[in-house]
Amino acid sequence: MSVYFLCLVLFSIGLYCVLRRRNIIKIIIGISIMEYAVNLFFILIGYRWHGRAPLLSQNQEVLRMVDPIPQELILISIVIGLSVLALLVAIAIKIFDKYNTFDITKIRKLKG
């Protein structure tokens, strides 16, 4: 149960970075931390203590098997998260090129 609480703490740290920081790079890092906390939570849901890999064996015993579906979904989530992170960094670079700052309080209007 304490591992789930640590996932909540990690998510809270990321949420704090997103809500309270004014630097775009720190906001992006906070989003990444929140994503990793959710990924860790889903991996922990599918994990079984002293479980075995979901491979077929000689006796076809299904006891104490680790659920493979959350692991597959998290692999897909990591790839999607990496592409979103690359997109956010590209947007941050374009904002820096236009306004010469990463501070969102100094950017008055974002004109398209």
Image: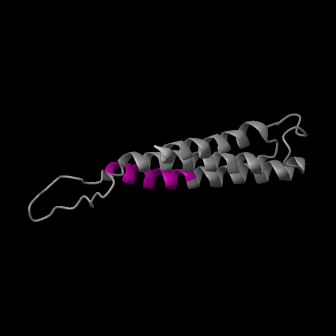
Q: Is residue 20 left or right of residue 49?
A: right
Residue 93 or 85: which is nearer the viewer?
A: 85
Q: Position of residue 47 (x, y in %)?
A: 36, 51
Q: Position of residue 69 (x, y in %)?
A: 33, 49
Quick check: 64 above or below 14? below
Query: Which quadrant does the N terminus fall into?
Result: top left
Quick check: 112 above or below 92? above
Q: Residue furthest left?
A: 59
Residue 71 or 44: which is nearer the viewer?
A: 44
Q: Is residue 41 left or right of residue 22?
A: left
Residue 111 or 88: which is nearer the viewer?
A: 88
- Residue 80 colored in magenta in the image: yes
Q: Mostly what secondary structure, the magenta segment?
A: helix
Residue at 62 percent of width and 50 percent of height: 32
Residue at 64 percent of width and 40 percent of height: 12
- Residue 35 colored in magenta in the image: no
Residues in magenta, as a range: 69-81
Residue at 49 percent of width and 50 percent of height: 40
Q: Position of residue 31 (x, y in %)?
A: 65, 45
